[in-house]
Amino acid sequence: FVFFSRLHKDSGVTFSTMYPGCIAETGLFRDKKPWFRKLFPLFMRYVTGGYVSEWEAGDRLAEVASSDRCKESGVYWGWNGAAKTVAYLKPGTDASNR
């Protein structure tokens, strides 16, 4: 949000932040115990619903970078529970205004 508020107006560059979901089967967890690496993706997929594959996370990044729907600057991009619809939250606004 700092880059957006300082630089967007003068530069015209679009600044966005995104959370693609929990990418639970990456090298990020390589130092965890084997039981954790096995159970954490299952927990994220079936209990929280926040699990996404690396491919899905990459598709979401590409959508934010290239989609006309995501051209607004200073926005936090996320996905709904079904993980099919992009939604946004302007920083400093109430989450109910998504």
Image: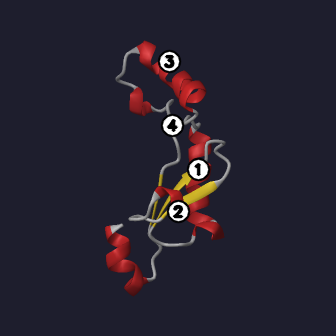
- The structure residue drawn at horizontal position 44% and vertical position 69%, both measured from the top left corner, is 74
Q: In front of the other: label 3 or label 2?
A: 2
Which type of secondary structure does the marked residue at label 4 adopt? Answer: loop
What amino acid is at disc 3?
Leu
- Label 4 and label 2: CA atoms lie apart by 27 Å
Amino acid tagged 2: Asn
Residue occupied by mark 1: 79
Q: Residue at 56% across / 26% down in the picture?
A: 47
Identify the mark at residue 23; answer none if there is no mark: 4
Residue 15 quadrant = bottom left
Q: Which residue is mark 3?
A: 39
* Alpha carbon distance from label 4 to label 3: 13 Å
Disc nearer the start of the sequence (3/1): 3
Answer left or right for 20 relative to 27.
right
Query: Which disc, if any, is residue 95?
Result: none
Tell me the CA gap for discs 3 and 1: 23 Å
Give the mark nearest the N terminus, 3 or 2. Answer: 3
Q: Earlier in the sequence, mark 2 or mark 1?
A: 1
Label 4 or label 2, whichever comes before in sequence order: 4
Picture coordinates of residue 5 (x, y %)? 35, 75
Label 4 neighbour load within 10 Å: few <14, some 14-19, many 20+: some
Q: Nearer the viewer, mark 1 or mark 4?
A: 1
Task: Tell me the distance, in whole angstroms, between the alpha carbons under discs 1 and 4.
Answer: 14 Å
Q: Answer with left or right where residue 62 lies relative to residue 76.
A: right
* Residue 46 shown left or right of residue 93 in the figure: right
Q: At numbered mark 3, what does the secondary structure look like: helix, strand or loop? A: helix
**Label 1, residues with CA under 10 Å away: few <14, some 14-19, many ≥20:** some
- Reading the image, the residue beneath label 2 is 97
Question: In this picture, is 3 found above or below 49?
Answer: below
Up/down of 80 relative to 6, above or below: above
Q: Say what amino acid the circle numbered 4 marks.
A: Ile
Q: Among all residues in the image, which is located at the extreme bottom? A: 10
